Image (cartoon, rainbow, N blue to C red):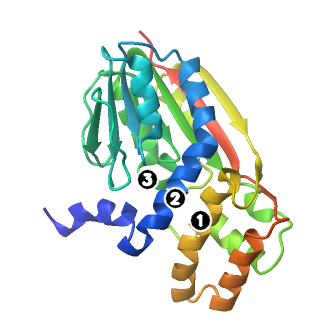
Amino acid sequence: MTEDDHEPEQRYRTRDDQVDIERLRLSMLAEARDPKTFGLLSQVGIAAGMHCLEVGAGAGSVSAWMADKVGDTGRVMSTDIDLQFHAEMPSNVIVRKHDIENDSLPREHFDIVHARAVLQHVPSRDELVGKLVEALKPGGWLVIEDGTFLGFGEQGLPEPYKTIHQIMSAGSLDEWRDPNFGLQVLERMRAVGLVDLDVVGDIWAMRPNEPSGEWWFLALERAIPYMVTAGVVDEADGQSALEQVRSEGFVMMSPASIATLGRKPL
């Protein structure tokens, strides 16, 4: 395997000294967003006997829920490039280490393909929509949850957190990321021929020490050491920002989460 073959895995793999905080962050994200995801999957008709694909499964909470819905006669393929956070799964779940950019998927195999907060981080995101559609059976559903950070970085927040938040929300720590990709998914699905298209979005209030906010504040906690090392943020300002977002009266608005659904024609 060449050095370039390792690059995607190294890009997305969590450093050993940040595993615990990332595990907690993923659990907060799941607790905050899983109910919305489950509603979307129910909307497209997940049922016993179906074959489903979960892309970027993280800890696997959505995969486990899917497994319960498809039952013993169904199957779930739960994939991620980094499986160190993935929980044990029921027997009808296939857990697979998988690079969605470079590894193949079976053609016309799945009734439902779902990806949440994945494509915005992948350089070839535009082409990936087509790749996921190829993996769907005719009549199958593609459900992509991404978002937009437009306006998220412009809130009236206290300094020094405001400046640090603007850097993070602009995605400037990750040259491959498009934090506004959620707004483009509908057109991508339309371009590859999906039908019965639907888009739903929501925002919510983010509070400290609650799943609503900790998925982001824990990401901030992970990012600040990198920002200090890069000379973008002063260490004292970074510490002050963490104290600000964990203060009892702190509240801010979330980015917009945008879910786009489309069905592959029969």
Which residue is depicted at the point 44% across and 27% down?
66
**Residue identifier under label 3:** 122
Residue 258 picture location, percent across and down: 65, 39
Give the x, y percent position of residue 73: 30, 14
In the displayed structure image, the side of residue 60 where residue 92 appears, left or right:
left
Query: Which of pointers 1 and 3 lies earlier in the amino acid sequence?
Result: 3
Q: Secondary structure at mark 3?
A: loop
Label 2 close to label 1 by CB (< 8 Å): yes
**Which residue in the structure is indicated by mark 1?**
218
Assess disc 1: are there few (<14), some (14-19) or many (≥20) residues with their C-alpha within 10 Å of its C-alpha.
Answer: many
User: How many angstroms separate mark 2 from mark 1 (CA)?
Assistant: 8 Å
Cα distance between the residues tagged 1 and 3: 21 Å
Q: Is residue 40 left or right of residue 208?
A: left
Q: Is residue 177 visible?
A: no
Q: At label 3, which amino acid type do we have?
A: Val
Q: Where residue 14 appears, x then y in whole percent?
A: 39, 66
Q: Earlier in the sequence, mark 2 or mark 3?
A: 2
Tell me the kind of residue under disc 2. Leu
Name the secondary structure under disc 2: helix
Q: Is residue 103 visible?
A: yes
Within 10 angstroms of label 3, few (less than 14), some, or many (20 or more) residues?
Answer: some
Discs 1/3, front: 1
> Number of numbered discs present?
3
2 or 3: mark nearer the eye: 2
Please tell me whether residue 9 is drawn above or below residue 245 in the rendered image: above
> Mark number for residue 24?
2
> Which dot marks residue 59?
none
Identity of the residue drawn at 66% across and 82% down:
238
